[in-house]
């Protein structure tokens, strides 16, 4: 769906000069967000049967074109020449992992078609999941073949769930892989009936075709939650929305934290905590964690949006035990090299053999805001958006991709970080080819990959990528690679400028080196005939991450009578970076007179063990925290559960 162009509000602050030669802002302590935190429980929750068994009760009725919502003028003025546009590119060194493979094509939902597809995807331990408007599919990432029974309708994961999540297939989908937990997150909105809902499903294992903990979160009968975006963080799943009252009037961005811990365990008491921003802000993105190194202790999640020649950064700290301590602080205004929004934020991207033009999406940052914490302690955020190069009063110029690497978002203290623009650049436009709708990510060695669409009056829209290694000149990218050359232009009767709302660049959790990218193209000129492509590649200098594992335990709490009684917890091991070794278990925190056994006493990745806890007559009543530890060599990880001992 359409996100509005926003007139940003700029804060006045002291200016510093970054390593890239452009100013950053030092803000002693960002002001707190206006308004109180909004806390709400899930509208409904359950645990699904395996997704491979589910089928949607109804699908899209006929051809559905995403309707554009009313825009808010961006107020962006044309600037002079782009000061960071790239004039030459180095040789391409990234190595494709194979020829790539086709993703979902149009009408995959069997019963109707959406246009455009809003292509999204994520890579897991053994699978790649792609989701477009109205349909999703699970692929074996080693062969590129779809798992039997897929694709399925986008609302199939909520079959039997009830309400709008089951009956509506409204799209704007996001799929994520929670690398630390080895779980999948599927989410799309339900907006064709009331109340407005966000449907979220979290897998119970690393198998995307298995069962899911399903939730719906509500936004009432007025707040239409457009353009949802999801970021994975250790203390929550963070989401952003552009709120349109009754689907018409822009009411500002909303940012929310969902209780990740409870959703991983299927706890029906999971809540969301949200802040509503003013109409000065829209198009925020949550930071999304890549790699196995977690952010510094206590680090908030970062939200960012596009300002006027600047970026705005917020810090969202959630407290699940005391909601009064939850805060949203910001924005910190970060000046960047001057730019003009591509097409003024609207439509001007040309295509071959047609006068119909495509939407630049130049009014927002493009998903994802990818975060990484390196072993040497430095933090990096990478993000991109579309700008206009070479335009003037009577010309919109050539659309291109502006990208950034920012560092130090947390700073020396959690409250007062000083974000620094470490490097920034705009892809060159000397060939007059328009480039837009990018997605960017960084691997474990600091290599950056940027995927995007490209089109011109001489070129059909195509799927391309470029990238850079840490030892190359800052602000520059290598020669681009054409992943999939388009063979047609989009020519919808009645006009449709939308070319998707986003694409997806993600990093493989197994080696933390391989990039996976998916976007759309047309196999021939026409209407309702888009296709998608999935490709993987890596930089030869990337060093694969060290094998490691995760540990989780369910349920989160149990109640047991003292005496000769027994209860059990399921302990699961997930693989990171190809981990295949046996993990042994131990438990601490048992009350007096209680005993515990594991069956089996050790498991390999993706395996489970049953922890059985027994009480005796001497076990005192009370609530105890049990710390379950898994160990292999020097690798040790723990999960905690609660045990309540009662008399009766």
Image (cartoon, rainbow, N blue to C red):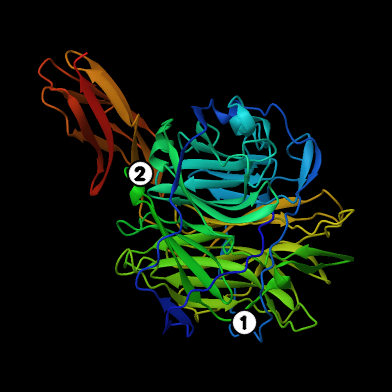
At 63% across and 75% down in the image, what residue appears?
Answer: 479
Can you tell which mark lies on residue 251?
Answer: none
**Left or right: where 459 falls relative to 421:** right
Mark 1 vs 2, N-terminal side: 1
Tell me the quarter of the image containing the C terminus: top left
Can you tell which mark lies on residue 320?
Answer: 2
Q: Is residue 607 above or below residue 420?
A: above
At 33% across and 51% down in the image, what residue appears?
Answer: 325
**Left or right: where 88 falls relative to 496:** left
Mark 1 = which residue? 85
Instruction: Choose mark 1 or mark 2, whichever is in front.
Output: 2
State the image coordinates of residue 87 (x, y, percent, origin top left): 63, 85
State the image coordinates of residue 14 (x, y, percent, origin top left): 41, 81
Q: Are marks 1 and 2 in contact (CB under 8 Å)?
A: no
Q: Relative to the observer, which residue lies in front, 451 or 615?
A: 615
Q: Is residue 204 above or below residue 299?
A: above
> Number of labelled discs?
2
Q: Is residue 195 above or below residue 4?
A: above
Q: Relative to the observer, which residue lies in front, 538 or 614?
A: 614
State the image coordinates of residue 634 (x, y, percent, origin top left): 23, 49
Q: Quadrant of residue 301?
A: bottom left
Estimate the spatial distance between the alpha carbons at disc 1 and disc 2, rounded to whole Å. 44 Å
């Amino acid at each position: 769906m359409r996100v509005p162009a926003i007139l940003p509000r700029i804060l006045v602050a002291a200016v510093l000069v970054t390593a890239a030669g452009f100013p950053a802002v030092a803000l002693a302590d960002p002001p707190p967000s206006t308004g109180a935190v909004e806390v709400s429980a899930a509208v409904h929750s359950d645990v699904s049967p395996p997704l491979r068994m589910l089928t949607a009760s109804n699908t899209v009725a006929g051809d559905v074109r995403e309707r554009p919502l009313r825009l808010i003028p961006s107020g962006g003025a044309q600037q002079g020449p782009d000061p960071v546009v790239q004039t030459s590119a180095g040789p391409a060194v990234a190595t494709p992992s194979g020829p790539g493979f086709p993703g979902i094509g149009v009408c995959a939902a069997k019963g109707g078609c959406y246009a455009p597809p809003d292509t999204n995807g994520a890579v897991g331990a053994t699978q790649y999941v792609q989701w477009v408007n109205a349909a999703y599919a699970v692929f074996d990432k080693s062969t590129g073949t779809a798992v039997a029974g897929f694709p399925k309708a986008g609302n199939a994961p909520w079959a039997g769930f009830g309400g709008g999540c089951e009956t509506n297939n409204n799209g704007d989908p996001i799929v994520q892989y929670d690398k630390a937990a080895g779980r999948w997150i599927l989410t799309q909105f339900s907006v064709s009936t009331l109340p407005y809902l966000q449907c979220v499903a979290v897998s119970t294992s690393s198998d995307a075709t298995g069962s899911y903990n399903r939730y719906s979160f509500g936004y009432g009968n007025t707040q239409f939650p457009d353009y949802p975006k999801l970021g994975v963080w250790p203390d929550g799943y963070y989401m952003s929305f552009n709120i349109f009252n009754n689907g018409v009037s822009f009411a500002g961005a909303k940012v929310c934290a969902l209780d990740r811990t409870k959703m991983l365990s299927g706890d029906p008491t999971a809540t969301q905590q949200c802040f509503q921003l003013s109409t000065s802000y829209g198009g925020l993105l949550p930071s999304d964690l890549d790699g196995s190194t977690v952010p510094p202790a206590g680090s908030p999640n970062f939200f960012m949006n596009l300002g006027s020649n600047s970026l705005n950064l917020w810090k969202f700290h959630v407290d699940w035990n005391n909601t009064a301590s939850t805060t949203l602080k910001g924005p910190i205004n970060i000046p960047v090299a001057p730019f003009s929004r591509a097409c003024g934020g609207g439509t001007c991207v040309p295509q071959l053999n047609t006068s119909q033009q495509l939407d630049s999406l130049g009014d927002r940052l493009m998903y994802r805001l990818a975060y990484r914490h390196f072993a040497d302690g430095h933090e990096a955020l990478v993000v991109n958006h579309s700008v206009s190069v070479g335009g003037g009063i009577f010309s919109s110029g050539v659309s291109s991709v502006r990208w950034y690497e920012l560092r130090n978002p947390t700073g020396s203290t959690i409250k007062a970080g000083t974000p620094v623009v470490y490097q920034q650049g705009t892809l060159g436009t000397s060939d007059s080819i328009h480039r837009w709708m990018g997605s960017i990510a960084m691997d474990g060695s600091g290599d950056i990959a940027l995927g995007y669409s490209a089109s011109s009056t001489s070129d059909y829209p195509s799927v391309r990528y470029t990238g850079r290694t840490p030892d190359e000149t800052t602000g520059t990218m290598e020669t681009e690679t054409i992943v999939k050359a388009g063979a047609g232009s989009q020519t919808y009767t009645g006009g449709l400028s939308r070319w998707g709302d986003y694409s997806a660049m993600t990093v493989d959790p197994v080696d933390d080196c391989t990039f996976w990218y998916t976007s759309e193209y047309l196999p021939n000129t026409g209407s309702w005939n888009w296709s998608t492509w999935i490709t993987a590649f890596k930089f030869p200098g990337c060093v694969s991450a060290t094998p490691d594992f995760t540990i989780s335990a369910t349920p989160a709490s149990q109640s047991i009578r003292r005496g000769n009684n027994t209860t059990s917890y399921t302990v699961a091991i997930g693989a990171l970076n190809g981990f295949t070794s046996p993990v042994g278990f131990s438990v601490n925190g048992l009350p007096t007179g209680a005993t515990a056994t594991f069956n089996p006493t050790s498991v390999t990745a993706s395996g489970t063990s049953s922890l059985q806890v027994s009480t005796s007559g001497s076990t005192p009543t009370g609530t105890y925290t049990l710390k379950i530890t898994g160990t292999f060599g020097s690798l040790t990880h723990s999960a905690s559960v609660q045990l309540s001992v009662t008399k009766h």
